[in-house]
Amino acid sequence: MQEFFQFKERETNFKQETIAGMTTFLALAYILIVNPAILSQAGMDKGAVFTATALTIIFGTLMIGLIANYPIGIAPSMGLNSFFTFAVVNTMGIPWETAITGVFIAAILFTILSLLKIREKIINAIPQNLKHAVSAGIGFFIAFIGLKNSSLIVSNPDTIVAFGDLTDASTLLAVFGFIITIIMLTYGWKGAIFYGIIITTVVGLFTGMIEKPAAIVGSIPSLEPTLGVALQPENLANALSPAVLPVIFTFLFVAFFDTAGTLIAIASQAGLMKDNKVPNAGRALLSDSTASMVGAALGTSTTASMVESSAGIGAGGRTGFTAVIMSICFAIAIFFEPVLSIVPITLTAPALIIVGAMMASEAKAIDWTRIEIAIPSFITILMMPLTSSVATGIALGFIVYPITMIASKQHKDMHPMMYVLFVLFIPYLIYSA
């Protein structure tokens, strides 16, 4: 096992990988609750989506761990499930059966692009400075998610966002978790992020801030209402209509660059990047696209490599064994939905804030002395948290980059693929707006 996952080469061990896997599980477990809640608003059966979500996470995460040796969790994208429900189904009026078939078709296209290694070539064509910007941008993005989840940052009609209410019990619990975690980190405790979540949960239960579960074990809901709907001939025909094709393109485009950005960030954070290339990128991308296909067939929206995986990296995860532990945790979690549902998203907020700070340090590797590099890098970093989208941040930064390179007469140093991305990103931004 140690040789298969390259423990020695990546300077890790069984205990460290196990703690990392459990840490990422805790950071991602909310998806089992949130994803069914969102997709049920599109008319899908909530119980079936819960089971489909869990099985998809198990399959995708296990696959990327065993095939690509990456410590990454694959799960339904929290942005694309909202797009699926609120934009495609509720606003455009497309039935969920047709929309989920669109997800399946997009996943097939994902898989073809992965097998042809087109996705891998695109990732490797991105300049080193922009890769650092993507990593730093995701760091700020997930830190912002953590701040919102803890209510330390709240919406404000006058200033857009404002500081939250420190008298709120859940916010105070998040602050406690943040403080106890950074204390353990400064003392050099490995697994501090994981222990921080556990300690905060125990404190919440003892103080009554978190309600005790009504039951420990629950029944597994049936998949029947959603299983195989995406494969039905009539739904396939409807999904290929002109009205749905732009939706399929959006599923494909956003998930492509969400995953690409996360893969770059995780590889960089874990110290796996070699010669500006992401090792085993093709296998990782194939794992993601296959998981999307399986997920759609089971009954859930497009999957992506999750940015919350960085919590496990911060806890020491370096190999696919971290992903294997995650999969085992999710397999067990299917039976413990009543217990899982009591843990608020608030408790994972400190982990996201701290890991976001760690990832933001990638910005130091950007050549800020060159304006043609600094501006697109800054746009990439800034727009991820401000638009709540990794793909949009990448799109805006990658549009600006060719402009500054051409203006500085350095266009010959730019990979031709960057021109292709420039052309593709403009209609994407117009459509998504």
Image (tube, rainbow, N blue to C red):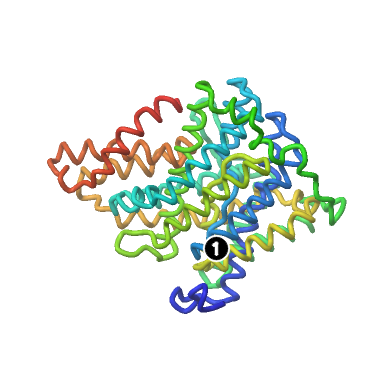
Q: Residue 231: x, y in percent?
A: 64, 37
Question: The C terminus is located in which quarter?
Answer: top left
Q: Secondary structure at mark 1?
A: helix
Toward the viewer: 22 or 197? 22
Q: Is residue 307 above or below residue 93?
A: below
Q: Residue 233: x, y in percent?
A: 64, 31
Q: Is residue 98 above or below residue 127?
A: above
Question: The N terminus is located in which quarter?
Answer: bottom right
Q: Residue at x 58, y 41 (%)?
A: 78
Q: Residue furthest left?
A: 409
Q: Residue at x 51, y 44 (%)?
A: 144
Quarter assignment of residue 25: bottom right
Residue type, mark 1 in image:
Gly
Quarter assignment of residue 301: top right
Judge whether residue 62 can be spotted in this image.
Answer: yes
Q: Residue 193: x, y in percent?
A: 58, 63
Residue under pointer 1: 65
The number of numbered badges drawn on the structure is 1
Toward the viewer: 360 or 57? 57
Judge whether residue 152 can be spotted in this image.
Answer: no
Q: Residue furthest front?
A: 233
Q: Residue 425: x, y in percent?
A: 36, 34
Quarter assignment of residue 421: top left
Would you say 53 lies left or right of 407 here?
right
Toward the viewer: 39 or 371? 39
Q: Residue at x 55, y 50 (%)?
A: 290
Q: Residues within 10 Å of mark 1 (few under 14, many from 20)?
A: many
